[in-house]
Amino acid sequence: MAAPSWHVGRYIQRNSRFLLNNFEQIWGHRSFAWTPALRQQAAQASKESTETIVIPRKKTWSKEAVLEALASTVGRDYTAYPYLFQDDPYLSPKNSSEFKLYSLSHESGRSAAKYFVDSNPKFFTQDFAEPHIPCLMPETVSLLLEEVSEEALKERISLRKVTAAVDMYDQLKQAGTSVSMETSHDLLDLICYYCDRDPVQDVGSEAEDTFQERSESEEGVKRRKRRLRHMSELIKSTWKENNNAERIFNLLPERDTRCYSALIRGMVMHGAPAKAFSLYTDMLNNRLTADVHIFNALISAAPGVRETYNERWDVITELLMQMSQQKVQPNLMTFNSVLQALKRCGLLARTQAGHTLSEMIALGIAPSLASYNHILAIFSKAASSGQPSPDILQDVMSELQGTSFTCRDPDDVQFFASAMRICLDNKDLELAYQVQSLVEFGENWRLLGDSYQQSVYYGRFFNLLCMMGHIDEVLEWYRQFVPSLFYPSPQGMKDLMQALDTDNRLDLLPTIWKDMRSQGHDNKKDLMEELLTLMARDRHSPEVQESFAACALDVKSAYDGDNGRPSLEWDISSLSHITTLLLRANKTQQAWDMLQLFKSQNRVPPQQLLQDFLSVCRSDGSAQRAVELVQLSAAFCLSVTPALAKQTLAEFNVTEKQRAVLSELESAGEPCD
């Protein structure tokens, strides 16, 4: 029985689709319980059963597909520090200076480790990574080929050994060995890019700079050293007459466009535009055509070889005409070079920038963010009122809204900071929201630039929010930016407190003070005085006054130098504000301690503060404290002492001993000298 049953089951399984179709066709002739919609579905199923099944091709996924899918399911954690510091929470930066120090420390450590690995490859031969990660394995940084050959020259070029490559080339020439044109091109590119000197080793220079910056305590000395170091770099990178690049160029048996291109671009890059144009003329005399890189370099250098604005534009126009005659197709960098050069052409730039952009679009070249940044700069300089015009930025944002960008020009990272500066100058918050929306679209945030440029962008946006936005919006953006994207400066925190004052939300000041403490701003005296002034200016509800008093005591501990920090110098306003806040919260003993601090710091309390303290003593019925207050006033030789003594005698039940003391102080009359 088992075998026949198995055959029947297999037969039914193989022919189940056939039976089901016939069953649906037979059932379809029955009219009851069938609607037109059900009949249509049955007909569709019958039609699909007769069609051929097409098996789709196998889709090949990238190795990062799973990680990308998982990453798309989560958003950014607004409370987390940047990913760079998540491996070591102890070194989580609190402000921009710590961010710079810690990030440079991370990078310095990586560079040192990489240098050690590359210098000792024999100790790092095991590859445990699966799949293979090339950047984790040692790279060749030392010369392996010592014989005089073209292969040894290529090795020195690949390792960026400028001096060694020039010496090897000279040895090859002395030996009568010819060098291929391709190798000569690479050698000229290397020499011209580094201006005939060896590039500075990253590890050594970074370690030396870090040691110098940490060993100096005077900020002025730091700035002077950085400025001198920058000036020395500029002097070193200046193009020198008859350097090795020019010498090797003249030794070449034949010179093609690539050779001229290396020298012209190097001359422009290192501050010799006049020599670049002279060499370009020599190339034309030799009946050679230039490439697009030569034209891009010469266009960017055009303002440096002419004085007047019209002459500069004439040079640019002539170069563009020669491009057309030589049938050289312009690219994005060509038009960006034109726009960048127009920024140095005065009012002429405003009319020509629009034509340049139109020509760019007509050739099918999409402008990059650098193109729009140059246009913003041109119209900002040409504005008659001296202030950037918001109209051009509004047009640009209407054009760019909802567009995802990739970096196509090194200057692309300048756009967002420039756009936010225009919004800030014109106090246009709605336009700033459009700029921020463009930043958040896709991965445009990657084009904000380095950490300094990001800090500039978010600082301007936050400043504009504090000036023009509602406090709820300001706090919402504040929680999104800090600390994951932005570390507010002391001025930024002061702007935030002013925004709280404008919208009458001073009850949030204790919370802002906690953020100031966590961000390392609790040693900024002017910032703390601003906080105390706002809290002590008006009276509030008992709950708010209680929180203000607790905040004032915390500020006092910061003045006294807690957590090993040096103490700050007390002034009259800070002492008075803290005492006032403690009195309003009925913390009489702490307020009395603050009055004693006046004496120890050689500060004289204001008369109004003593009147307020006497009022608190009257409400508490503390006659002894009132007498001590009058005695303290007499110790400061204040003119209000007799009035305080008379008021105390009239409003307090004092003992005979206290009355005698007060009567003596009242009759003292004139204050001390």
Image (spheres, rainbow, N blue to C red):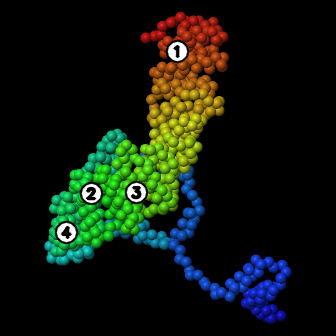
Contact check, label 2 and label 1, Cβ < 8 Å? no
Spatial distance from mark 2 to mark 4, Cα to Cα? 22 Å
* Image coords of residue 515 (percent x, y): 53, 42
Spatial CA distance of label 2 from label 1 is 77 Å
**Residue 303 placement, left or right of 137:** left
* Mark in the foreground, 1 or 3: 3
Dot 1: element: helix
* Mark 3 surroundings: few (<14), some (14-19) or many (≥20) residues within 10 A: many
- Check disc 2 and report the residue beneath it: 313
Cα separation between marks 4 and 3? 34 Å
The residue to which callout 3 is attached is 372
- Residue 81 point in image, percent of width and height: 51, 52
Q: Could you say which disc has been placed on residue 283 in the image?
A: 4
Q: Badge 2: how crowded within 10 Å, few (<14), some, or many (20+)?
A: many
Q: Amino acid at mark 3?
A: Tyr
Q: Which residue corresponds to the image point at 52% horizontal and 25% vertical from the top-left?
A: 576
Amino acid carrying mark 2 in the image: Trp
Q: Earlier in the sequence, mark 2 or mark 3?
A: 2
Numbered circles on residues, count: 4
- The residue to which callout 1 is attached is 633
Secondary structure at numbered mark 3: helix
Please tell me which of labels 1 and 3 falls first in the chain.
Answer: 3
